[in-house]
Image (cartoon, grey):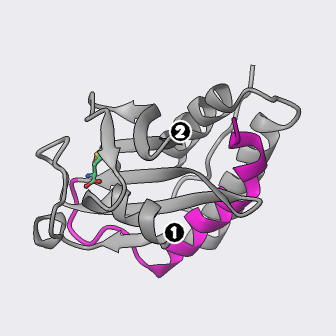
Amino acid sequence: MHDFSPLAGSDKPALYADLIAAARAITDGEPDAIANMANVAALIWQYVPDLNWAGFYRLVGDELVLGPFQGKAACIRIALGSGVCGTAAATRATQRVEDVHAFPGHIACDAASASELVVPVVHDGRLIAVLDLDTPLPARFDEADAAGMEAVCAAIAPALQG
Ligand code: SME
C-alpha cells in the first residue's frame, strides 16, 4: 500500500526530512493511536540503520507499558524514573545514552544493545509515550539523531494520542 523508499547513504538532515514526511503521510487521517505507533515504528526500522529495537512505550496510568515495536520481545512495564525510558518519561527530556552499561538502572531487554536514544512524545502538555531506539553499536546516536527523532515525535504526536 505505502511504498516508502529511503535514500541509501543519505545524510542525516535528508534522512530525517524524509522520515518526517513519511511518518506524516502514513498517519494522516488515521485516528487509531496504536495503528499509528505500529506504522511509525516500522518506518523507523526501515529508514534508520543499525537498530536492534525501535518502538514505543505508552504512558498508561502511572507507568509505561510496551507498545508497538520492531525487534526482540521486550520488558512490558517500566516504572516512571526507572531505566532510560522511565527517566525520559519522568523528566520529559530526551535521553541519549552512549553506553547503556554505564547508565544507572538501565533495563537490558536485549543483551546486544550498546547505546540508546529515548524521546518523550508530548501533546497538549501531556506525556503520551516515549519512543525508544536501541542499537548494538556504541555511541550510535549523535545530536543530529536526537534532534531528528524529536522532530519526528513532534510531527506525529497528535496522531499518537489515545
Ligand atoms: N533499555 C530500556 C528498556 C526498554 S528496551 O531497551 C526495549 C530502558 O532502560 O528503559
Q: Residues within 10 Å of mark 2 (few under 14, many from 20)?
A: many
Which of the two labelled residues, at mark 2 and mark 1, occupies the earlier sequence position? 2
Give me the residue at 60% from left, 67% from top.
150
Q: Nearer the viewer, residue 3 or 9?
A: 3
Q: Is mark 2 within 8 Å of ligand 1?
A: no
Quarter of the image with the N terminus is top right
Magenta residues?
136-162
Task: Name above or below for residue 115 compared with residue 56.
Answer: below
Q: Secondary structure at mark 1?
A: loop
Q: Residue furthest top?
A: 1
Q: Which residue lies under the disc numbered 1? A: 92
Q: Quadrant of residue 63?
A: top left
Is 70 placed left or right of 21 in the picture? left
User: Is residue 110 among what the camera can see?
Assistant: yes
* Position in image of residue 33 (x %, y %): 68, 32
Q: Which residue lies under the disc numbered 2? A: 41
Type of residue at label 1? Arg
